[in-house]
Amino acid sequence: LSFSGLTCVYTDGQKITYNKEETILKNLMLHGQFNRSYRFSITEPGFACGISFKPTTLHKLTDLDVSKFSDKYYIFNEISNVLSNKLEPIFKKHKNDFPTLFNHLEKLLLELPLIENKNTIAIDNVIDIINLKEGMISVNELLEKIPFGQKTLETQFKKMVGLTPCKF
């Protein structure tokens, strides 16, 4: 669905296996988009809570190339220590009170600066067009509606969303 997101794993004993690579899930984890299913294993009962971002939000919050996170989970403070240090305490402090947790997360996320420029605006426009057409649009049709060539569209889209426009 082209959603990246963050998940705070509150308990031990959680892991995923994807392409024979095992990742232990703990604390605040970043995940990119997954195009296929993966094995989620638990050895102990536990719980987690997370948020999914709209397609370009992770890029706008971090200025990272989102395509580098596809099909993987990462410990978020190893990716964005500054943002992790703002988010993780909120997840941990309110882990037993989800309404308060989400109110605090929303407040923080609305206060954070977003990277917005002509490229992010154009890619958001492309996403809106694709969604409006329910995915039934060609790259050539998209190119008629945006100020990019094909290579720039594909490069910028993949950087901000994590997938090419065709996969999206």
Image: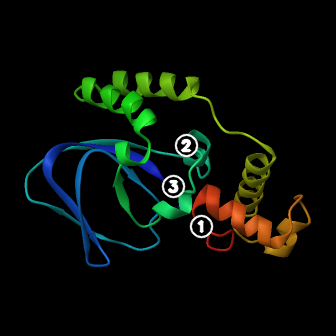
> Which residue is disc 2 drawn over?
62
Q: Real-space Cα distance between discs 2 and 3?
A: 15 Å
Residue 138 in percent (x, y) is at 79, 75
Q: Is residue 90 above or below residue 151?
A: above
Residue displayed at 81% across by 46% down: 118
Nearest the viewer among 102 and 27 is 27
Where disc 1 sits, the SS reads: loop
Residue 116 in percent (x, y) is at 72, 39
Q: Amino acid at mark 2?
A: Thr
Nearest the viewer among 133 and 163 is 163
* Residue at the far left in the pictured view: 44
Camera-nearest label, 2 or 1: 2
Q: Is residue 145 above or below residue 90?
A: below
Q: Amino acid at mark 3?
A: Phe
The tag earlier along the polypeptide, 1 or 3, is 3
- Mark 3 crowd level (few <14, some 14–19, many ≥20, 10 Å Cα): some
Q: Quadrant of residue 117?
A: top right
In the figure, is residue 105 to the left or right of 38? right
> Which residue is disc 1 drawn over?
163
Residue 97 in percent (x, y) is at 27, 24
- Mark 2 crowd level (few <14, some 14–19, many ≥20, 10 Å Cα): some
Image disc number at residue 3 = 3
Residue displayed at 40% across by 45% down: 6
Residue displayed at 10% across by 49% down: 45
Is residue 134 shown to the viewer in this render?
no
